Image (tube, rainbow, N blue to C red):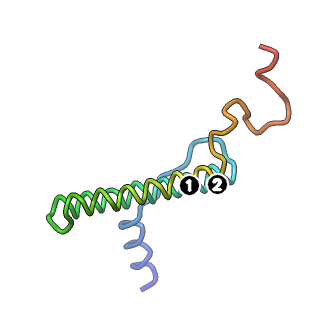
Amino acid sequence: MEKSIMSKDNFLYPRGRYYGQVKPENLVFNANLQEFAQRVSYICNLETGGKLSPDEAYDQIKALWKHLKRTRKQLQIGENPFQNGDDDSEGAEK
């Protein structure tokens, strides 16, 4: 029974592999980004199927976007674009 639940969850909530720089904040943001994309997909499908009005879909996606931006800011993703997380300053001598 447990195996069928896991496969259903994997089907409904697929997770892509992460290929970027492995840091805890990047992994958390990647998970948040994948969840955002999955939820936007569901909202779009509900709107296309007539279950949500365009205004409701827009409002829900806008709220999800604001939440994603807030988590990005909290995790400080992209604030130091030239810092690669290493102690040596490789790019300074080029």
Q: Mark 1 = which residue? A: 70
The picture quadrant where one finds residue 57 is: bottom left
In the figure, is residue 57 to the left or right of 84? left
**Quadrant of the image for the N terminus?**
bottom left
Query: Percent from the top left, x then y, of residue 40?
Result: 34, 57
The picture quadrant where one finds residue 93 is: top right
Name the residue located 42 percent from the left edge and 59 percent from the top edge.
64
Label 2 residue SS? helix
Q: Residues within 10 Å of mark 1 (few under 14, many from 20)?
A: few
> Residue most toward the left?
50
Number of marks drawn: 2
Q: Looking at the image, is 43 positioned above or below residue 16?
A: below
**Quadrant of the image for the C terminus?**
top right
In the figure, is residue 88 to the left or right of 82? right
Q: Mark 2 = which residue? A: 74
Label 1 residue SS? helix
Q: Residues within 10 Å of mark 2 (few under 14, many from 20)?
A: few
Name the residue located 53 percent from the left edge and 57 percent from the top edge.
31
The answer to which of 32 and 6 lies nearer the viewer is 32
**Type of the residue with mark 1:** Arg
Name the residue located 39 percent from the left edge and 79 percent from the top edge.
4
> Residue most toward the right?
88
